């Protein structure tokens, strides 16, 4: 699973950058996008991120669209961990492969 965390220094919320360490692991990669700078803002706009921050989206291959989205006060470590677990279970049940399987296959 991949977690994309959109934030800005000026935004509040219950979750911050330091919380990504609690979510990341061998099978969960986290990336942070600071919408307070031009590149981050452009990426957020291109992905349809609204004005309420922080926002975290959970992605799981082979899906191109996010499987879960947590926004504002609903963006908490426990809520994200629940979504990540569901995404991993979905990947196992569908037999989803990743780039490593494709390259080695």
Image (cartoon, rainbow, N blue to C red):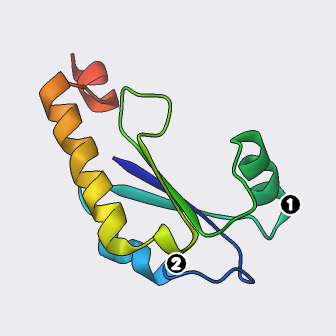
Viewer-proximal residue, 54 or 32?
Answer: 54
Indicate left or right for 85 with 73 as reference: left
Say whether disc 2 or disc 1 marks the residue closer to the N-terminus.
2
Q: CA distance from mark 2 to mark 1?
A: 19 Å
In the rendered picture of this protein, how many numbered marks are placed on residues?
A: 2
Q: From this view, report whether residue 94 is shown above or below residue 26.
A: above
Label 2 environment density (alpha carbons within 10 Å; few <14, some 14–19, many ≥20):
some
Counting from the top left corner in percent of width and height, residue 22 is at 31, 76
Secondary element at tag 2:
helix
Q: Residue at x 80, y 57 (%)?
A: 41
Q: Residue at x 72, y 51 (%)?
A: 44
Residue 46 seen anywhere in this rendered image of the structure: yes
Indicate left or right for 70 with 44 as reference: left
Viewer-proximal residue, 25 or 81?
Answer: 81
Counting from the top left corner in percent of width and height, residue 65 is at 50, 32
Say the numbered circle drawn on residue 84.
Answer: none
Q: From this view, report whether residue 89 is shown above or below residue 94.
A: below
Residue at mark 2: 17
Q: Residue at x 17, y 41 (%)?
A: 89
Residue at mark 1: 38
Viewer-proximal residue, 27 or 76?
Answer: 76
Examine the image and state in which quarter residue 103 appears: top left
Residue 24 seen anywhere in this rendered image of the structure: no
Counting from the top left corner in percent of width and height, residue 102 is at 29, 20
Examine the image and state in which quarter residue 46 appears: top right
Q: Residue at x 22, y 52 (%)?
A: 85
- In the picture, the quarter occupied by the C terminus is top left
């Amino acid at each position: 699973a991949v977690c994309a965390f959109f934030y800005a220094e000026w935004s509040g919320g219950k979750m911050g950058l330091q919380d990504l360490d609690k979510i990341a692991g061998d099978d969960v990669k986290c990336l942070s996008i600071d919408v307070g700078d031009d590149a981050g803002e452009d990426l957020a706009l291109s992905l349809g991120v609204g004005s309420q921050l922080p926002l975290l989206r959970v992605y799981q291959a082979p899906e191109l669209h996010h499987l879960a989205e947590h926004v504002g006060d609903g963006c908490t470590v426990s809520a994200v961990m629940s979504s990540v677990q569901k995404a991993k279970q979905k990947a196992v049940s569908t037999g989803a492969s990743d780039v490593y399987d494709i390259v080695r296959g």
